Amino acid sequence: MDEKLREYKERRTRWQDKTNSQLGFLNNLILTIGIAFLTFNCKSFNLQNYRLSFENIDFSVSFLFVSVILVFFSIILGLGLALNRLWDFRITTHINRVRQNVYQYSKDKNNNDKNNEGEKLDESTPDNYNLCDVLSMYRILSKEKYPNITIEDCKDYLKNEDVKLKIKREFKELRGISHNLGRYSSKLVKFQIIFLGWSIFFFLLYIVF
């Protein structure tokens, strides 16, 4: 492999690891702040003195109530993000293992040439899912019914054309799931921060009023 290309790949891998670490750190930080803030809000919220009414609205209590709801949703999003990243890591690990196994077992065993290489699976950019596809993806993940390509399948890659087509189809599906999990991890952390920010804003309004 070209030295410069190897350097670029190593650099990409290194920064991907840093990005994942920072995303995990940020999620844990926002979750910790959110839980602490929710606890603090609940201590300030006296339910015994609160009555739901559209007459003589107490804006101070209403702001506190909205703040509690928003920080609660921020925490839910944080937990969802943690689960999202767990699925993403699991599927990405499986993708890398399948790619390695297919490359290894698709080599011509009778060819001792150093340039003898195995087959490389699809590396094109997966499509972005629409809302229906995303809902279907999470339903599949929750039931753990996503494709599972075994090492036996990889060993039969060159021997059986049907297995070969099956691996390519399921591998493409796995890459699509992994790609869109990554996309939605970014969206989840953004909304997690936004909800926490608005929660703090409404709590400040509660203090002012």
Image: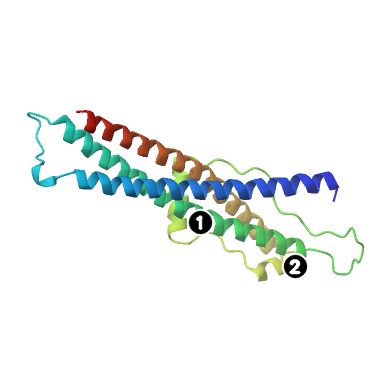
Q: What element carries label 1?
A: helix
Disc 2 residue crowd, few under 14, some 14–19, many 20+, Cα 10 Å: few
**Residue depicted at 57% across the width and 49% down the height:** 20
Q: Is mark 2 on a helix, strand or loop?
A: loop
**Residue depicted at 52% across the width and 59% down the height:** 146
> Disc 1 designates what residue?
87
Count of labels in the image: 2
State which quarter of the image contains the C terminus.
Answer: top left
Q: Position of residue 83 (x, y in %)?
A: 45, 55
Q: Residue 159 carries which label?
A: 2
Disc 1 residue crowd, few under 14, some 14–19, many 20+, Cα 10 Å: many
- Up-down relation of residue 84 to residue 111 (above or below): above
Q: Where is residue 123 in the image (x, y as percent from the top left)?
A: 69, 48
Residue found farthest to the right: 113
Nearest the eye: 187 or 95: 187
Q: Indicate the amino acid at tag 2.
A: Lys
Lateral position of residue 103 relative to residue 86, left or right = right
Q: Indicate the amino acid at tag 1.
A: Trp
- CA distance separating discs 1 and 2: 31 Å
